[in-house]
Amino acid sequence: MKWQIYYSDGSTFNELDGLAEQAPSVGVQVIAQADKDLNFTAISGDDYYVWDDKGGGFRWWGADHIGFILYMIQPGWKKVLFGEMIDGEKFTEIHRHASEDLQVGRKTGFAPWERKPDE
């Protein structure tokens, strides 16, 4: 699996469910994505998530408000997902589920920006 989105209501969406443009846009909590060095990385805590190829291949990127505006003024097709504030315990449970999801695969390490499970 290349990516999976985890939502506030406990649902998920990944490339096996449909294309990036078909992903539900509201209530995003965590996005797990394939990573050549770590098996997958997780992004979370952003206001917006954008589908872009700025890193040499299409993937989801977290963005703040200015990042969202800069993304939107670039030419071409766009897909934006919106984060949502939820209770801290609920967020921790969704994040734990994303970290342990066998469908995504086990992590082999953590990127510098990622929150480790025991933090």
Image (cartoon, helix red, strand yellow):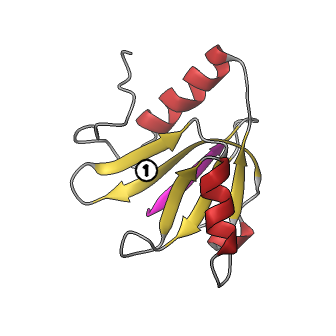
Q: Position of residue 80 (x, y in %)?
A: 70, 61
**Is residue 82 visible to us here?**
yes
Assign the magenta stretch its main secondary structure.
Answer: strand
Image quadrant in which you'd find residue 117: top left
Are there few (<14), some (14-19), or many (20+) residues within 10 Å of tag 1? many
Q: Which residues fall within the magenta stretch?
A: 1-6
Q: Nearer the viewer, residue 88 or 56?
A: 56
The answer to whether residue 49 shows anywhere in this view is no
**In the picture provided, is 41 more to the left or to the right than 53?**
left
Residue 33 vertical placement versus 27 (above, below): below
Q: Is residue 65 left or right of residue 4?
A: right
Quadrant for the C terminus in the image: top left
Secondary structure beneath dot 1 equals loop
**In this rendering, is residue 17 above or below 61?**
below
- Is residue 5 placed above or below 88 in the rendered structure? below
Quadrant location of the N terminus in the rendered image? bottom left
Q: Is 73 left or right of 53, judged from the image as shown?
A: right
x and y, in percent, of residue 87 in the image: 71, 18
**Residue pointed to by mark 1:** 104
Please give the name of the residue rendered at 58% of the width and 67% of the height, measured from the top-left corner.
51
Residue 77 drawn in magenta: no
Q: Amino acid at mark 1?
A: Val
**Residue 5 covered by magenta stretch:** yes
At horizontal 59% and vertical 30% (from top left) the residue drawn is 94
Q: What residue is at 72 percent from the left and 35 percent from the top?
A: 8
Residue 7 image offset from top left, x and y in percent = 69, 42
